[in-house]
Amino acid sequence: MSSSVGAISIQPGQGITIGHIDGGIISLGQELPNGASPIYASSAVVANAPAVATLVGAPGRNTYINGFEITGSGATVALPVNVTVTGVLGGTLNYMYGAVAGVLLENAPLVVAWTPALVSSGFSQNIVVTCPALGLGAAGNALVAHGYLL
């Protein structure tokens, strides 16, 4: 038998869940607004190729992104790259990321979270996160984006 306990921050008007304990598992995150539908997108695990995750918009609804994560292995010839988030209100966001030199080594993950979530530049608009190829010999790179439709 498992039990569930939630801990909610006291921040009027924000409705943010600080933690949730369910059967010994702790999860952190933001509550979704009323009427929101969660969406997730993942790239394939790619070898020296762009990793792309697209949060697909829906007719008459705004797309929101509340974060993304990039993980992967190093490369023989590692490159610094410009990770982009497109389709958000205000224009393209840019983040620098790079692979370590060494195919059998693990890159430090890039974890980005926004509270409140960022909204798309218009109704039915996709939000796309792209991580370019990390360099010659890069064996694996993956990207996951998450958000919601409202």
Image (tube, rainbow, N blue to C red):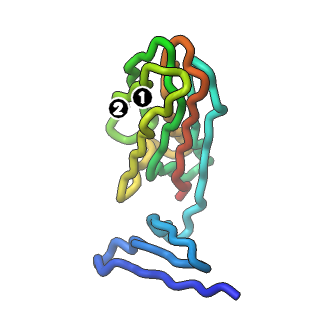
In the depicted view, which residue is nearer to us: 31 or 149? Answer: 31
Q: Nearer the viewer, residue 54 or 99?
A: 99
Q: Residue at x 50, y 33 (%)?
A: 106
Q: Position of residue 47 (x, y in %)?
A: 62, 21
Work out whether mark 1 precedes mark 2 in sequence or the reverse, and give the earlier one.
1
Quick check: 25 above or below 37? below
Of 87 and 85, the residue lying toward us? 85
Give how far across and how far down residue 100 sits, in percent: 42, 24
Whether residue 45 sits left or right of residue 91 in the image: it is right
* 3D distance between C-alphas at marks 1 and 2: 5 Å
Specify the label residue 83 is tagged with: 1
The answer to the question of whether label 1 and label 2 lie on touching residues, with beta carbons closer than 8 A, is yes
- Residue 56, given in percent of the width and then of the height, sits at 60, 42
Quadrant in which residue 83 is drawn: top left
**Direction from residue 47 to residue 147 in the image, left or right:** left
Which quadrant is home to the N terminus?
Answer: bottom right
Q: Secondary structure at mark 2?
A: strand
Mark 2: few/some/many CA within 10 Å (<14, 14-19, 20+): few
Label placed on residue 95: 2
Residue 88 to residue 139: above or below: below
Residue 32 tag number: none
Say above or below: 106 vs 28.
above
Amino acid at dot 1 = Val
User: Is residue 84 shown left or right of residue 26?
Assistant: left
Amino acid carrying mark 2 in the image: Tyr
Of residue 104 and residue 79, the one placed in the foreground of this image is: 104
Residue at 58% across, 37% down: 54
Q: Residue at x 60, y 53 (%)?
A: 39
Secondary structure type for disc 1: strand
Q: Residue at x 57, y 84 (%)?
A: 4
Q: Residues within 10 Å of mark 1 (few under 14, many from 20)?
A: many
